[in-house]
Amino acid sequence: MTKNIPAIAVEGLRKRYGEVQAVDGVTFEVAHGEFYGILGPNGAGKTTTMELVEGLREPDEGSARLLGQPSWPRDPGLLRRIGVQLQASAFFEKLTAREQIHTFASLYGVGPERADAMLETVGLTDKAGTRDDKLSGGQAQRLSIACALVHDPELVFLDEPTTGLDPQARRNLWDLLRGINSQGRTVVLTTHYLDEAEILCDRVAIMDSGRILRVGAPSELIEELGVRNLEDVFLQLTGREYRE
Amino acid sequence: MSAFKSLSLAMVKGQLRDRTAAFFTLVFPLMFLLLFGALFQNDSAPRSHVLQVGEVAVLDEMPAEQRRGLSEALDVEQTDDREEALSRVSDGDVDAAVWEDEEGRIELRYSAADAARAGTVQGLMQSLVQSANLAATGQPATYELATDQVEDKSVKAIQYLAPGLLGWAIAMGSSFMSAFTLVNWRKKRILRRLWLAPVSPGTVIGARIGVSLGMAFLQTALFLAIAVIPFYGLKLTGSWWLVLPLVASGTLAFMSVGLLIGAWAKSEEAANAVLQLVVMPMAFLSGSFFPLENMPGWLRTVSNVMPLKHLNEASQGVLSRGESWGAALPAIGGLLLFAAVLTFVASRLFRWDDA
């Protein structure tokens, strides 16, 4: 592994949808093993940024390199090394939790034992026979994360994994995400929860209107701007209240 | 397990676990075959039913061999009560009553309500009397009628019902499955998720086609197995197996219909509604439920643009009318061309996301 190249190197990404400039010149780097957060209110351009970085969409301008490889055009060799969780849980119709993860495992050439172990890791062994539409919000998110991790990727993208969960389920998920990161994986997560970013992330990029306003460790940003928490950081940077 | 196998398995499970969809695409057409096949079983020309009052020499003295041959066309019932016999004729209960008067004249009374049946029974009795007359003279016949069977061009109900209903089942199943997969996978972002997995589009599309072909062949096997049991009485002819490539190309053609509708539709419900609007009228116009011969000419012209009509006709030809490549190849070619054109149009309308 070449540790001297960053896990993610993003350079001048732009994407326009009709009249809307969803992403307007985004540049950042993520180091190996880092837990990186992209933080901002709804409509800030987090998801589009994530999709451009993952290689799901072609950028109008700029480039994203993952583990040294460009993510666009699609490169199956690179896709084996990254894991993604999309915003809505992408599950197959009418399959049980175990069948879902076995299907995803086989897409990556991973055996059923490893898939079952992953189900155990996210604490869903007792829900293995439950169909996706009968899982609670937190269980569905954990299954979705398990499906993203089943092939043991070096780099993991999670798009708003805790949205819509109750506080207890969020905390459970935070423990899971910390565990994933502590095994040496690079994790990138988008969130519109400031507290989540503050607790989980080594560094955060604060986004608004398709641009990154500031990047830094949560504690440094708070200190630098002389405020109490990330909410105040956002207020300072944009001049408006943070609205979820 | 390979990606191809596991995706196929995911599709099959998803489809069979959706009870309503499984019923309407797999069981429903089979029920039609079981029901229609039984209803239209005796669709051939009915036998004439004649009441014989008292003794009638030409009937009673008929040689046994001739009597057997006649029993295909004529059913004779004995009675002694002429009044009752006549009232049964006028009720339409039997086709005619026949008796012999004192001078040996044969009297036939029929009801004119059904002209065709009246004509048949008159002709039959006439020929019986004439041949009895000839036999009475002891002379050889001056003219002789030689008869032989020609290749059977007529169609028994099961001969068009089996391929017609099978065609309808294939059209419904294939189009529904591909539309549903496309709409559902787009809505649930599985398409996006698969893009980010190291699996080739060919594997995904191949799995979808493989599952649809498998289902179509299973339906074909069930349809034929039912149709050939003696109760339904379909008799397969030489190149009947050509129905397999026909069904395969039909499956591709109707999958492309589903792709086009799926590319357009925003929800499974919308796709299903549009599919019903397309498939049902097409099935009627393609002779899936009744023969096209009964349709007005302009409607038959319209039916020529229906891919299902060509599938039905070619399947009927190879299954039970002794036809072969000559009937199958043009239909296969046409269906594949249709599939190619519609798939191309669908690819232009393809969207990754709902928005």
Image (cartoon, coloured by chain):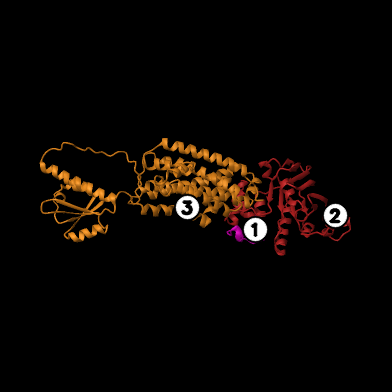
Chain colours: A red, B orange
Task: Tell me the number on the disc at residue B38.
Answer: none
Query: Mark on residue B26?
Result: 3
Marker disc for residue A140: 1
- Residue B277 at x, y percent in the picture: 52, 51
Can residue A43 be found in the magenta stretch? Answer: no
- A152 vs B86, left or right, is right
CB of mark 1 within 8 Å of CB of mark 2? no
Q: Residue at x 75, y 43 (%)?
A: A64
- Marks 1 & 3, CB-CB < 8 Å contact: no
Q: Residue at x 71, y 50 (%)?
A: A156
Can you say whether A103 is above or below B336 in the image? Answer: below
Q: Are marks 1 and 3 on the same chain?
A: no
Q: Which chain letter goes with mark 1?
A: A
A4 and B45: which is toward the camera? B45
Q: Which residues are magenta?
A: A124-143
Image quarter for residue B140?
top left
Q: Position of residue B275 (x, y in %)?
A: 53, 50
Q: Do discs 1 and 2 belong to a common subunit? A: yes
Establish whether labels 3 and 2 are both on one chain.
Answer: no
Q: Quadrant of residue B317?
A: top left
Q: Chain of mark 2?
A: A
Q: Amino acid at mark 1?
A: Ala
Amino acid marked by disc 2: Leu
The residue to which callout 2 is attached is A237
Q: Is residue B112 visible?
A: yes
Q: Helix, strand, or loop for circle 3?
A: helix
Nearer mark to the viewer, of 1 and 2: 2
- Secondary element type, mark 1: helix
Q: Is residue A128 magenta?
A: yes
- Neighbor class of circle 2 (other Cα within 10 Å; few <14, some 14-19, many 20+) is few
Q: Chain of mark 3?
A: B
Q: CA distance from mark 1 to mark 3?
A: 31 Å
